Amino acid sequence: MTATIATVSTRLNEHPNRAITFVTMTPPSWLEHVTLVAERGRAMLGRPPGGTNGTANLAATCDRLIARRGEASGLALATEVVHALERMNSSDAAAFLEVLAGSFSAPAEEVATAVARWQADPTDDAVMALARATEAPRQELFRRLNMVGGGAAALVKLRGRLLDLLPTRPHLRGVDADLRHLFSSWFNGGFLRLEQISWETPAATLERLIAYEAVHEIHGWDDLRLRLAADRRCFAFFHPLMPGEPLIFVEIALTRHLPAAIAPLIGVERPIAEARDADTAVFFSISDCQPGLRGISFGNFLIKQVVRELSAELPALRTFATLSPLPSLAKAVADHSDAGAFTVERLRALTAAHHDELRRLAHVDDELEALSRLLNAPGPHDPVVARLAGRLALAHLLHVKVRGRVADSVGHFHLSNGARLERIDTDADLSPRGGQSHGVMVNYVYEPQRLEANHERYVSSGHVATAASLGGEIKAIDAAWSGAGRQERRSARAAR
C-alpha cells in the first residue's frame, strides 16, 4: 500500500452541468510503512511466515536482530520476535526472561576493562566507554522491538510476567531495571493523550474499562452505563505506542456535597442529577490498567489535567476531592510486631477511653481482643467501634511511615500529589473489599492553589497536610502515640 484515499469531494464550478471531483490522498501511516518494509525484509531473509518457535531459536533471532544494520531485515526480525512474545504462555515467558538475564547481560570482562580504564584515567571518554560497557545488550534489543507494531505492548506484557516472578527469582532484577528505564522514557507524560470516555467510546475500549476496574467492580454493561451517566465523568490516558489500550483511568461523580460513603455513588438505583448543578467533583476510582507499567507514574498527571478539563467544562465546581480506600489499615492494626506502627501499647493508648465499652460489646475480658473482633465484624459498626476505626485510620496516615512516606499506598499517592487529608469517613465501604480498611474511606481534597506547597512539604519532610477540622483529633492521637512510645522505651530499659 502506497497511499490511501482519505476524502472524495465534489464541487460545482461556474458551469452547473459540470462537476469536478477532488481525490485527496494521504500517505501510509508509520505502522503501515513499517509493516510493508518488514514484509520485504522477511522475503529478503527467506524467513518462513510462521516465525520463530522455541526459546533457543528465539534467542538466536534476538542475536541476529541486535547485529543487523539493515532497516528491512531488522524490522522483519523484530516483527518475528514480537509475534513470538505475543504467543508465549507463562512458562515460555519465564524461560525467555532467564535467557535475557543471562545471555543478554553486559559482558563482565568488558565492564571490568572499562572500570579499570576509568580508574586509571577518569576522563569524559572513559566515562562514556564505561556507560557503553555497562549497558546490557538486551536494552538495544528492547529498543528495536519497540520499532514495530505491537512491540511496546508485548514488552509491557512481558514485564507484567516478570514482576510476578521477581519475588522467587530476584536474579531477574537487572532485566526489570532495563525495562523500567526504557519505559520511563517511552511513556513519558509528554506523550500521554487524555481522552474522555463516554457511552459513544468504541465498545472495545469500554470492555477494557470493565475488565480493568480495580477499585469498585463494574458489573456489566448496565452498570457501566450508569458510571457514564450525565452526572458522571470518566477520563483515561492513552499512548501512541499502545493504541486503544488505556494506561490508567479515573471515574468521577459530580455531586452537591463531599460524599461520606461509596454505595450512594455506585448504587444501581441512584437518581441521575444534572451536571450543571454540581459544586463538587469526586474522584472515586483510579485504576491502573497495565501491570507491566507498575512504577511508571501516570496518576499525578491524570488528576491535575482532569481538574483543568472539568474546571473549563463546569465553572461552578468549587471542590475537587476523592473518596479513597485505605487498603492497608486492617493488616497494619493486626500486626503488633512493628515498633514504628500499631504496637500493643499504642493500641491501648489510642482506645483508652473506651476499654470498658469494648469489653462489654464483644463479651470478652481483653480490650484488644474485643477491638479486633468488633472491627472485623461486618458493618455497620457500633458508633463507638466506628469512631475508633476512624481514629486508627487517621493515626495510620499520620504516623505509620515507610522511608519517610505514608505507608498506605493510596494515601501516599494523593499526598505526594499535593492533596490535603480532609476527612475520615467511617462505615463508608460496607462491601467485602471494605474489610481491608474496616469500612473506613478517606476524602483527600485537591486545592489547586495549594498543590505545589503541600507536595514540597510532603516529599521533603513527610508532612501530611490536614484540614483544620481534624486538629483536635490529631492532638489526641499524637499524645497517645508519643506517650505509648515513651512507655515502651522505659519498659525496654527496665527489662535490660
Image (cartoon, rainbow, N blue to C red):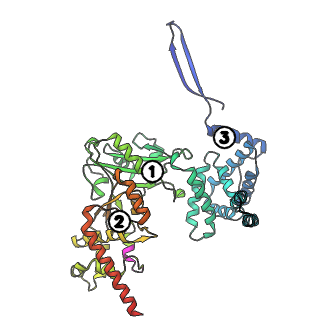
In the rendered structure, find residue 34 and report the number of the disc placed on it. Answer: 3
Work out whether mark 3 precedes mark 1 in sequence or the reverse, and give the earlier one. Answer: 3
Front disc: 3 or 2? 3
Front disc: 2 or 1? 1
C-alpha separation, residue under disc 3 versus residue under disc 1: 31 Å
Residue sitting at 56 percent across and 70 percent down? 167
Q: Regarding mark 1 in the picture, which secondary structure is present there? A: helix
Q: Nearer the viewer, residue 39 or 117?
A: 117
In the rendered structure, find residue 292 and report the number of the disc placed on it. Answer: none
Q: Regarding mark 3 in the picture, which secondary structure is present there? A: helix
Query: In the image, 81: left or right of 183?
Result: right
The residue singled out by tag 2 in the image is 432
The residue singled out by tag 1 in the image is 301
Residue 352 against residue 282 in the figure, above or below? below
C-alpha separation, residue under disc 2 versus residue under disc 1: 31 Å
Q: Nearer the viewer, residue 113 or 46?
A: 113
Q: Amino acid at mark 1?
A: Phe
Residue 292 in the image, given as x and y percentages of width and height: 54, 57
Mark 3 crowdedness (10 Å alpha carbons): few <14, some 14-19, many ≥20: many
Front disc: 3 or 1? 1
Dots 2, 1 in contact, CB < 8 A: no
Residue 24 in the image, given as x and y percentages of width and height: 57, 24
Mark 2 crowdedness (10 Å alpha carbons): few <14, some 14-19, many ≥20: few
Mark 1 crowdedness (10 Å alpha carbons): few <14, some 14-19, many ≥20: some
Q: Amino acid at mark 2?
A: Pro
Q: Nearer the viewer, residue 483 or 291?
A: 483
